[in-house]
Structures are given as structure tokens and as C-alpha cells.
Image (cartoon, rainbow, N blue to C red):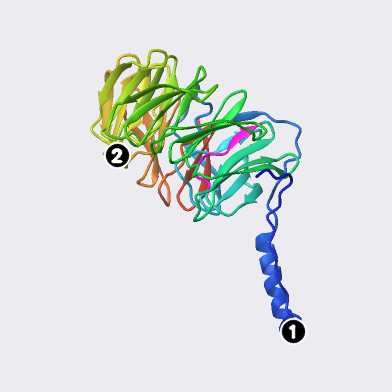
């Protein structure tokens, strides 16, 4: 279904009984307030996107080429309506966007945290919204149905452009290239839509999928619940490579140069050559890996669900250091020239010296850290359970 300028309206019936007229009027006002059309409308002719998707780009890059302090000053906090999946904010110009599990997309001012608008929909948003020019693309999973609405919203005009119904559950992170957006369903079906929300192709992989895919050179790399790793031609959906590597793979891929890094449920980190599809090395970490690895100019950084965190040489798989730390790790950390910023399920953000794994500081939260941090304009944006977004400034 494709809708232009779609509004989600509510109908209310009024009684002609004068005795209850006032009661009905009060109830109707309350219902209309709850059903009023949501709106994001930004009156700006700029469309400078700093961070358009989860991991900045389709290779999933969590490295920032800056030196960062371990001293943080809280600038603001803001509340979303619902909690978050393991995702991140995205950013355009002076705005940050986040979807929540209550089906809403929120926009906050980067500098002061004031809400610039909200899209209210019924369902849940599991993946990070994707930004393209003045548009927001996001999959809304409908409550109690095997149905997702793929929604395209113009935040300059303040209206929905397209709403496409997909009889599937789109819960994994999206990808994009110059021509299209790629959606990944739980049952393993992959959909390619152009930016005007027209389906180009779909392909069934016939295995359940709870993995964050990555893409480079026209190839999509993904793992599935059955432990297979699959490479797909983004032009036509043809499966180029399929190989059983593990019992199950629930993590995510990060691509650096010609290697694709990902982990499995038994704690193995793999490095696959993106041209030959051969495994260059495999490293045992002895704990379930659920995150995308972070990669900088020399090393790979990742944690597992046994509270271990690792720094591994990205070229040969040698373990540089490993540390047992507070918390369990399933959200991807970000890396700068000198620091790691590691969210964990023990309600904190760990600031770590990346050269040796030394814990420098811990920023405590009221709830479990859920979002992978994002660094923009000397600020780090994080999120934790119960729908709280917080912005900290680096203090030298």
C-alpha cells in the first residue's frame, strides 16, 4: 500500500443524550489529543547528514578519527515514549533521530535536547531509522501481526510520502547504497527498495535472521540463526556464497578494507576475505558474541556475554589484550584515537584506554545501556532503558 500525505485518524461517536454530552465531549477531546496526527517539520534548507544509519555507513564503521577526553560533562537528557532495542541515534544537521519500541520516532536538538517533533505510530520500531536527504525511512512492526509498514517521511514538508505494507517482521538493521535501501526480515527474506519505495527485488534465504548485516562493493554480508554465512549480490539478490560456519550467528558484521569481521554464539571471531570468501583467521573468546565488532586503523575491539573484552590485531588475529570487565556486552562500543566507550548491561558506560584495556572511568546510569554511542561535534550521545537519551560533552 502506498499512501501520500497519509494521516492516522481516529473516529469518535457522540451521543445525542444531553445528559452525557459534557462527558462525551471531555472524552472526545482526550481521544482526539491522543490521536492527533504526529508531526516532524524542520524549516531548514540544509540537509547535511553526519550519521545517516547504524554504524555511520553500510560497512558499519564505529571508529572516530579524533582524540577524546575521559572527562564527560552531562549536557542534557531527554525522554522517549518507549524503550530501545540495541541500536543508535542518527543525526542530520543539528538534529538527532531515534525510534523506540512504542512505535515512535523522536527528534531532539543536538545542542540542548529540546524535542523538535515526534511521529506517533502504533507498533514497534526495532531498527535505527535511516536518513536520506530530507527523508526518514523506518520499518514499523505492527502489534500482534505478521506485518511491517515501511514508512518514508519527509521532515522538510512534514508529511508521509509512502507507507508500504510488507507481510513480514522487519526487525534487523537496514542498509543503503546510492540507489536503494535493503530491509532484512526475521524469516530471512531480504527486500531491496529504491528511494521512492518501489520494490526492486526480494530473496528468501530460508533461515531465520537476527544479525546486523554489512555491505561493500555491491555485496551484502550476513549470518543467520542456523550458523550460515551468506554473501548476496546487491544488484539482483543472487546468493554468491553460502557456508555453514557455526551453530548460530546472532551478532553483526563490520567491514574494514577487504575483511569482514563477525562473531558467533560460541565466542568465535571470524575474519572473512570479501573477495575470496575464505576465512583468514578465527579467534576464540569463550563467550557468546552479540555485537558488531569495532575496528580502527590497527585493531578489532569487541566484548562477549561472559564479561570479557578483547583487543585483537585486525590483520592476523593476535590477541593484544583481554580484560574481564563489569557488565555484559551486547551493544557495539565506539572507538577514538585513544579511547573506547563501551556500553554495558550493568547500567553504565565504560571509558577504556584502548592501548592496554585499563578502565579509566565509569559513567553510571539509572538503567541498562542499550544504544551504541554516537560522537558528533565533541559530544557523545548515548541511550539507556526506559527511553532515556543523554548527551555528554568531552571536557579537556
Specify the segment rendered in magenta.
125-132
Q: Quadrant of residue 187?
A: top left
Report the disc number at residue 17.
1
Identity of the residue drawn at 43% across and 48% down: 365
Residue 64 vs 130, above or below: the answer is above
Residue 102 vs 152, above or below: the answer is below
Residue 61 visible, this orientation: no
State the residue in front, 280 or 386: 280
Identity of the residue drawn at 40% across and 48% down: 368
Report the disc number at residue 66.
none
Residue on which the image places disc 2: 305
Q: Main secondary structure of the magenta part?
A: loop
Q: Position of residue 280 (x, y in %)?
A: 31, 15
Mark 1 vs 2: CB contact within 8 A: no
Q: Nearer the viewer, mark 1 or mark 2?
A: 1
Instruction: Give the mark nearer the N terminus: 1 vs 2.
Output: 1
Q: Secondary structure at mark 1?
A: loop
Q: Secondary structure at mark 2?
A: loop
Instruction: Judge the density around disc 2: few (<14), some (14-19), many (≥20) Cα neighbours within 10 Å.
Output: some
Q: Quadrant of residue 228?
A: top left
Amino acid at each position: 500500500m502506498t499512501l501520500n500525505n497519509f494521516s492516522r485518524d481516529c473516529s469518535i461517536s457522540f451521543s445525542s443524550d444531553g445528559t452525557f454530552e459534557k462527558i462525551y465531549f471531555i472524552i472526545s477531546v482526550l481521544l482526539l489529543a491522543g490521536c492527533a496526527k504526529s508531526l516532524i517539520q524542520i524549516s531548514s534548507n540544509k540537509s547535511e547528514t553526519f550519521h545517516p544509519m547504524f554504524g555511520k555507513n553500510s560497512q558499519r564503521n564505529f571508529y572516530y578519527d579524533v582524540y577524546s577526553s575521559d572527562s564527560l560533562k552531562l549536557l542534557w537528557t531527554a525522554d522517549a515514549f518507549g524503550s530501545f532495542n540495541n541500536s543508535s541515534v542518527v543525526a542530520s544537521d543539528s538534529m538527532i533521530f531515534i525510534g523506540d519500541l512504542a512505535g515512535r520516532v523522536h527528534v531532539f536538538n543536538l545542542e540542548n535536547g529540546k524535542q523538535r517533533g515526534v511521529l506517533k505510530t502504533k507498533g514497534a520500531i526495532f531498527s535505527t531509522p535511516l536518513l536520506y536527504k530530507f527523508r526518514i525511512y523506518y520499518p514499523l512492526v505492527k502489534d500482534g501481526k505478521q506485518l511491517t509498514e515501511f514508512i518514508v517521511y519527509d521532515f522538510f514538508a512534514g508529511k508521509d510520502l509512502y507507507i508500504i505494507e510488507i507481510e513480514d517482521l522487519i526487525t534487523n538493521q537496514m542498509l543503503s547504497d546510492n540507489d536503494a535501501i535493503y530491509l532484512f526480515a526475521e524469516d530471512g527474506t531480504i527486500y531491496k527498495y529504491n528511494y521512492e519505495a518501489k520494490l526492486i527485488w526480494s530473496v528468501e534465504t530460508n533461515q531465520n535472521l537476527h544479525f546486523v548485516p554489512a555491505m561493500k562493493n555491491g555485496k551484502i554480508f550476513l549470518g543467520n540463526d542456523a550458523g550460515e554465512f551468506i554473501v548476496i549480490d546487491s544488484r539482483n539478490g543472487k546468493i554468491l556464497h553460502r557456508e555453514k560456519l557455526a551453530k548460530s550467528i546472532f551478532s553483526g558484521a563490520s567491514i574494514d578494507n577487504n575483511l569482514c569481521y563477525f562473531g558467533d554464539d560460541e565466542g568465535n571471531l571470524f575474519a572473512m576475505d570479501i573477495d575470496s570468501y575464505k576465512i583468514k583467521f578465527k579467534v576464540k573468546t569463550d563467550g557468546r558474541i552479540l555485537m558488531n565488532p569495532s575496528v580502527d586503523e590497527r585493531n578489532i575491539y569487541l566484548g562477549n556475554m561472559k564479561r570479557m573484552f578483547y583487543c585483537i590485531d585486525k590483520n592476523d588475529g593476535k590477541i593484544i589484550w583481554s580484560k574481564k570487565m563489569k557488565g555484559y556486552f551486547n551493544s557495539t562500543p565506539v572507538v577514538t584515537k585513544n579511547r573506547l566507550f563501551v556500553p554495558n548491561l550493568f547500567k553504565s558506560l565504560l571509558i577504556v584506554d584502548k592501548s592496554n584495556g585499563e578502565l579509566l572511568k565509569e559513567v553510571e546510569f539509572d538503567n541498562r545501556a542499550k544504544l551504541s554511542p554516537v560522537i558528533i561535534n565533541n559530544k557523545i550521545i548515548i541511550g539507556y532503558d526506559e527511553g532515556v537519551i543523554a548527551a555528554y560533552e568531552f571536557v579537556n
